Image (spheres, helix red, strand yellow):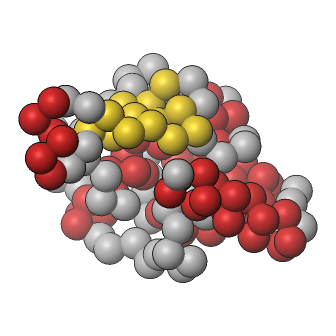
Amino acid sequence: MLYNRNWDRQIPNRSGDIWHIDNFIAWLETMHGTYDYFDPGCCLIAQYLKAMGKKQVTVGPNRAYFRKEGWLARFRLADSHVLPDGWDNIAVSNGTFEKALRAAKELRGSFSPEQILRESSELSFAHAA
């Protein structure tokens, strides 16, 4: 596989929440080419989560799985997280990062700022539980 300079690029984390649509869009803006939706370890969302620092990511329908860190890793337990509304649709309906970026911006535009903040805080709370 050829080296891609974007792999080492640090993506600004605008709100401190990897599940915030603005962080997803910021990452999409750095990506070019195509992705394979059907590869759960290298699909669009798995690549994003790896770029955000998650380890051993697998993505299924509307859910992402991560291998636990630290001493729990020896038991091969996994954390899981429900994907935010619309993210799976962004990934499944496209095959290029450019189309996914347009779809993500359309999704962001379909929510009011209050809805985005509420969804982000609900996801953060659910993930912490």
Q: Tell me what residue is drawn at x 58 percent, y 60 percent.
A: 124
> Can you tell which quarter of the image residue 111 is in?
bottom right
Q: Position of residue 96 (x, y in %)?
A: 53, 40
Residue 86 horizontal side relative to residue 7, left or right: right
Number of numbered markers: 0
Eyeballing the image, is 17 above or below 71? below
Eyeballing the image, is 38 above or below 122? above
Q: Quadrant of the N terminus?
A: top left
Nearer to us in this view, 61 or 81: 81
> Can you tell which quarter of the image residue 123 is in?
bottom right
Eyeballing the image, is 25 above or below 40? below
Nearer to us in this view, 5 or 109: 109
Q: Tell me what residue is drawn at x 71 percent, y 48 percent.
A: 103
Residue farthest front in this picture: 129
> Can you tell which quarter of the image residue 66 is in?
top left
Residue farthest top in this picture: 38
Visible residue check, residue 91: no
Q: Tell me what residue is drawn at x 54 percent, y 79 percent.
A: 14
Visible residue check, residue 116: yes
Q: Position of residue 44 (x, y in %)?
A: 47, 40
Q: Tell me what residue is drawn at x 30 percent, y 59 percent.
A: 53
